[in-house]
Image (cartoon, grey):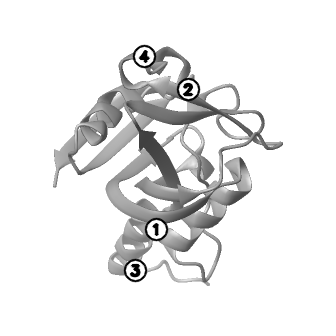
Amino acid sequence: MERPLPKATLKVAFSMLIFKKMRNATLTILIKDGKILLAMKKRGFGQGKWNGTGGKVKDGEEIMEAAVRETEEEIGIKAIDLEKVAKLDFHFPYKKEWDQSVHVFLIKSWEGDPTESEEMMPKWFNLKEIPYNDMWDDDKFWLPQVISGKKLEAKFTFKEGEEIIDKNIKLI
């Protein structure tokens, strides 16, 4: 006859499920001469939305290394000077595999010219004409603050349809 697990063991197991470490990802943004470079995602997660470049951090890879690698793969530029400006935690209760901690970097200098890849189509926008209606719902809350020089940490929870149901933004 099997004995039930002690309550303490169940509590630890439950909290490990709740506080499971989220996947790390990166997001990079180029700003120059009053313009911001965004890229249209052509396939995969976020397809059809304007966004910065970035993606998943590989096992054994440093977060900043991933930011440089992803930017080069997606728009063909080599980031030289990066500044971390935000950490964004995204929760998707209806699709837990999408949960992630995104480390946001401003790229202050780079080599090369942004070019289209199979995954991303880059385009410069005036800072006053950012296409928020064609971006992730959270961008309108944190991106203006980053553009104005602030650093922040934020948590966003989405419902199906990728609409925000809860948010918490803290300046750091």
| Relative vertical location of residue 58 with respect to residue 106 in this rendering, above or below | below
Which label lies toward us, 3 or 1? 1
- First of labels 1, 2 by sequence position: 1
Label 1 and label 2: CA atoms lie apart by: 22 Å
Determine whether 64 is above or below 160 in the image: below
Question: Residue at position x 69%, y 48% from top?
Answer: 75
Would you place residue 136 above or below residue 64 in this image? Answer: above
Q: Which residue is mark 2?
A: 160
Residue for point 52% across, 77% down: 62
Residue linked to disc 4: 129
Q: Is residue 136 left or right of residue 122?
A: left
- Count neighbours of disc 4 (C-alpha within 10 A) and say few if under 14, some if 14 to 19, many if 20 or more: few
Secondary structure state at the residue bearing disc 4: helix
Residue 150, x across and y down, in percent: 20, 46
* Amino acid at dot 4: Glu
Q: Which mark is residue 21?
A: 1
Q: Amino acid at mark 1?
A: Lys
Which image quadrant is residue 16 in?
A: bottom left
Q: CA distance from mark 4 to mark 2?
A: 27 Å
Image quadrant in which you'd find residue 167: top left
For the residues carrying marks 2 and 3, which lies nearer the camera in this image?
2
